[in-house]
Amino acid sequence: MKILTKKAIEQKNSFTIQTTLPTESSLQPHNNRVNTNNKYNIYIPVQWKFLIAQIGALLWVLLSVWVALPWMIHLATVFGWMLTIFAICGMAILPGYISALIIFSILLDKRPRVMTDRCFPPISILIAAYNEESAIKDTLFSIFKQDYPNTIEIIVIDDGSTDNTTKIVEEITDHNVNLIRHEKNHGKASALNSGLLMASQSIIITVDADTYLYHDALKYIVGRYLGDPKNTAAVAGAIAVRNSRETWITRIQEWDYFHGISIVKRVQSLYQGTLVAQGAFSLYQRDLVRELGGWESCVGEDIVLSWGLLKKGYRIGYAENAIVFTNVPETYKKLFLQRRRWARGMFEALRAHPGILLKRRISLQFIFLNMLFPWLDISYLLFFIPGIIAAFFGIFLLAGPITLLLLPLVALNNIVIFSVQSSMFKDRGIRIRRNLRGMFIYIFLSQLLMAPASLSGYISEIFSLSKKWGTK
């Protein structure tokens, strides 16, 4: 085992990286492979898929408005047109558009098969750890057991832990693990940057210290990168919940990761633009990360880095079958802090890379949709929830036709997502555990739990309140 201090790492020679922005020719896969699995497959270009999904979603919006127009006119006589449009669009029309867009996109999405019988490059894995004595050993052993056919350089960065994290890593002597020690806690970004300086391989993969890798997760995430277009700078892996049976809060998050987070990344990747390569498990081109100066010291370091790559014209892929299992917050307080941090990260990324809004690409729409989330959260809390409560007392002023029309669409959305995700898990040999209680709470109450945390994050960022590493 090689043990280095943060100071020793920083004394290494500084690097200067020169890269060229992606061109049209770089949109070919790394292996110049064309999907010819079935000669009867009909290839639909990405631009046409996007257009078809947009038309389908807009037709749903037009139908919703047509059905609900009399109700909206009546509502406007009470609240005025400005407030009516703000409320109805935020709690019904825009969520309906997003749900329809997801459904059409999933139905059009035919994922290319990951080529695992190929020549894989050596990789460096960066693990930033802070007080992870209960999980770091399992994480490392899940890497040791990987079915990966080349060298794996493992770099653990102990960011000033006050428990036995360092001791546990030092006791692992039968595998090649490099340990970097920070005398004081400087935050996750600082830890990852120390690992970035030490990484000797051109492909780096970040793994959270409490994340357990499925047996061939590395092969699948690297395989996806090798098969993606040449301008791919990063690939996000698929995150599943490991501790889903601990509390009702973790049961909800199992469905949130399985249904919500995974499917959003899948749709974004279909249109060549996954927005975030999350720190828990993602692949990056080392030199491009160095060119951007590494991870920025902020609460949303992975979002800021991802948007920096997108602004420069690169794409981020998504390996939906490169699966890892991570521990999620077990109490609402910790979940609240996590989702508040995620919400702040979006504003941090926008502040760091405002030019991304001027970068013409198909996936630009998803960035604008992200910017509308505060509107959705406010509308949900101030209009949708009060409208549902009032309906129980016979007052249907806010619970109108669009609200009712949205329910079957959401149900269809969940059915399609479950079918697609279940099929992928089955192919990977992973059994989906029974969690009906978590599903019920996720469908009907998850936004009620998440929206206040997100709004708190938006407000915290606007007023520049203090930040800390906190929960991932």
Image (spheres, rainbow, N blue to C red):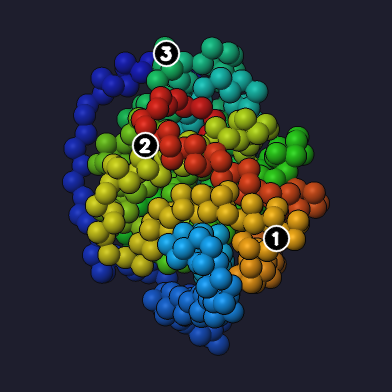
Q: Nearer the viewer, mark 3 or mark 1?
A: 1
**Residue toward you, 207 or 143:** 207
Residue bearing mark 3: 184
State which tag comes first along the sequence, 3 or 1.
Answer: 3
In the picture, the disc for residue 142 is: none
| Residue in view at x 40 percent, y 27 percent | 465
Residue 390 in the image: x percent, y percent?
A: 69, 55
Q: Quadrant of residue 415?
A: bottom right
Residue topped by disc 2: 462
Identity of the amino acid at label 2? Ile
Cα distance in 3D space between marks 2 and 1: 36 Å
Look at the numbered discs 2 and 3 and tell me whether their residues touch, using CB distance below 8 Å. no
Three-letter code for the amino acid on which mark 1 is drawn: Ile
Which residue is tagged 1? Answer: 395
SS at mark 2 in the image: helix
Residue at the image position 58 percent from the left and 13 percent from the top: 163
Q: Is residue 242 left or right of residue 364?
A: right
Mark 1: secondary structure: loop
Tell me the distance, in whole angstroms, between the alpha carbons under discs 3 and 1.
58 Å
